[in-house]
Amino acid sequence: MNAHTTTARRTALFAAGLGLTALALSGCAYFGPLHETSDSATVDDATTAGVDRIRLDRLDGTVSITGDPSATGISIERTVRYWGQERTIGDTHRVEGSELVLGGCGPRCIVSYTVTAPADIDVGGNTDNGGIDLEAVRDVDLETDNGRITVRTAEDVRLETDNGRVELTDVSGDIVVHGDNGLVQGKGLAGSRTEVETDNGRIELDFETAQDVHATTSNGQIILTVPAGSFRVDAQTDNGSVRSQVADDPSGEHELVLRADNGSIDVRQR
């Protein structure tokens, strides 16, 4: 390599570095400084009496909802983070008929909620980014693009997620989970039917009641623990082993249909 080539390459690298620096600086100018505010609100008892569902409306930010058997109203704690010039962020929640709607706060803005509500409330809707944590609620029907979903103590649960693990504990109703990427884990599952499908991620399910189970993963292990019962067992994997402590009973009351493209399948019985 001659001196002219070396000098030219150094010049090009220096120019590229200046370009990246300018881009970073322009990005900082575009987003501006970060601001954070926190506040709280209460939905009064009379209004709460007509609300039986909380709906998440395409927001960016974490959401935590806890059911309290002694609660008669709904309390909302909110944290807002936004970039750019200081501005006033108005209410981002509203009541529409029988729903309390938790909304977003606009561009370059993230809003997180911590909510306490009566324990028999349903939760539904969708989020773009951020974890969702639910405890002691009724039925759950949620979709999220990015973020972990945790549900503890609920009845029927239906979840769809593009990226993020799903953790279920003490679910007494039926379960449907469709995910693209992330572990799906459940314990204390006591419904009559569970369906779990994920493209990339392990599936671990521990059942309190004998029930129909359909579990499918393209990449990952399937581990099931079931109580005593009679099961029709149909477990297949393209790459991996199949081990089952549960005998296949062609006339069994329940069915276990398990599919893995890449990963082992392990069925255990208490």
Image (cartoon, rainbow, N blue to C red):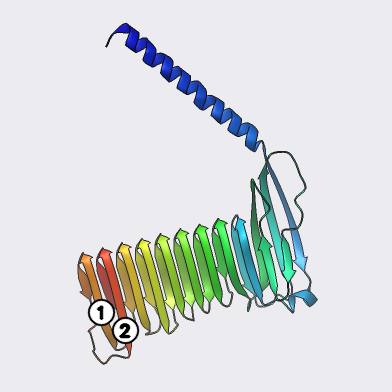
Residue 72 figure quarter = bottom right
Residue sticking out furthest to the top: 3
**Taking the image as drawn, is residue 266 in sight?**
yes
Q: Circle 2 is placed at which residue position? A: 255
Q: Secondary structure at mark 1?
A: strand
Quadrant in which the N terminus appears: top left
Give percent across and percent down for residue 123.
60, 71
Question: Along the line of sight, which residue is nearer the eye, 239 or 208?
Answer: 239
Give percent across and percent down for residue 257.
30, 78
Left or right, 118 with respect to 127, comes to right
Q: Amino acid at mark 1?
A: Asp
Left or right, 131 with respect to 270, comes to right
Tell whether label 2 touches label 1 (CB within 8 Å): yes
Q: Secondary structure at mark 2?
A: strand
Quadrant in which the C terminus appears: bottom left
With respect to residue 63, does 245 lie above or below? below
Q: Circle 1 is placed at which residue position? A: 234
For mark 2, does the 10 Å Cα neighbourhood hold few (<14), some (14 to 19), or many (20 or more) residues? many
Q: Amino acid at mark 2?
A: Glu
Give the mark, 1 or 2, whose residue is nearer the N terminus: 1
Q: Residue at x 29, y 89 (%)?
A: 230
Q: Residue at x 34, y 8 (%)?
A: 4
With respect to residue 228, does 79 lie above or below? above
What numbered label is drawn on residue 168?
none
Q: Estimate the spatial distance between the alpha carbons at disc 1 and disc 2, rounded to whole Å.
A: 8 Å
Residue 202 figure quarter = bottom left
